[in-house]
Amino acid sequence: MGIGDLSLTCLKREKAKGEHGATIFQNAWSIYDTLSEKNYMHHREIYARVGEWLEKRSGEPYSILDLGCGNARFLAPCLQKHPPGMYIGVDLSGAALEEAKGHLAGLLHVALRQEEMVKTLERSSEKFEVIFSGYAMHHLDSPTKEKFLTLCFERLAKGGGMLLVDITRKEGETRDEYIRKYLEFMRRDWTEVPREELEEACAHVQVCDFPETESVLTDMAKRAGFGRLERLAAFGPHQLFGLGKAE
């Protein structure tokens, strides 16, 4: 249900719902930030694994492209411990990017771009040792997800790696089944979220969340050119994957 980078497709879906849908979009960033702080989507555990992954690159200079960066609240501490030579963050939310400046303070060569992440990849010719995307790709439809992964593969430097934090469906589970169960989980367990905000978040999930199964993601990654898709952490549907590019 990540709202760090609502795709243009998702934005159109929500605005097509009329005034209520537009309100959901406008409020989405602040609601998501509240949810992540409460750790309902296991941000703390997942980003601990991200830090461990980056530690393995310790001593190697690297650049990182963060797609759907939001305010970088959870990635920034990992980067402070293992500083990149260059960080580029991309998000549609101007408010989130303003907050990101504070979280990323102290890092060298930081650039923040207010743009849809697929367009960034299409326009860029830069190569990165690391590409990161947190709770953003599931907003894309299936063909655009595959395009996104293909473009990420093209933007990775030789020997580079991609980290993907996202939600997945169980094998054999339909989207409707997934949405029903996830909404039940939200309404049952997200007890510290005000009712109005919770229902806006639920409405967002119904309109914009299109998670794939792990097997489908694996096939997409292979067609994109990645040698592997490895699950690095899993907390229910909240997952961390590593995607490698051959040396």
Image: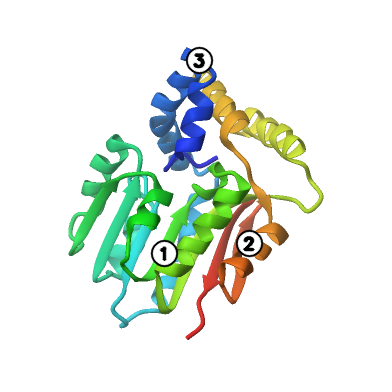
Q: Which mark is residue 119?
A: none
Work out whether mark 2 precedes mark 1 in sequence or the reverse, and give the earlier one.
Answer: 1
Horizontal and vertical percent for residue 22?
44, 20
Q: Is residue 118 visible to us here?
A: yes
Work out whether mark 2 precedes mark 3 in sequence or the reverse, and give the earlier one.
Answer: 3
Q: Which element type, helix, strand or loop, lies under badge 3?
A: loop
Q: Amino acid at mark 3?
A: Gly
Residue at the far bottom in the pictured view: 247
Q: Which mark is residue 131?
A: 1
| Residues at discs 2 and 1 in contact (Cβ within 8 Å) | no
Query: Alpha-carbon distance for marks 3 and 1?
Result: 35 Å
Q: Nearer the viewer, residue 90 or 97?
A: 90
| Residues at discs 3 and 1 in contact (Cβ within 8 Å) | no
Which residue carries the number 3 mark? Answer: 18
Residue visible at 27% across and 62% down in the picture: 87
Q: Amino acid at mark 2?
A: Met
Residue at the far right in the pictured view: 172
Q: Which element type, helix, strand or loop, lies under badge 1?
A: strand
Q: Which mark is residue 220?
A: 2
Above or below: residue 80 compared with residue 139: below
Residue visible at 18% across and 64% down in the picture: 108
Horizontal and vertical percent for residue 110?
21, 58
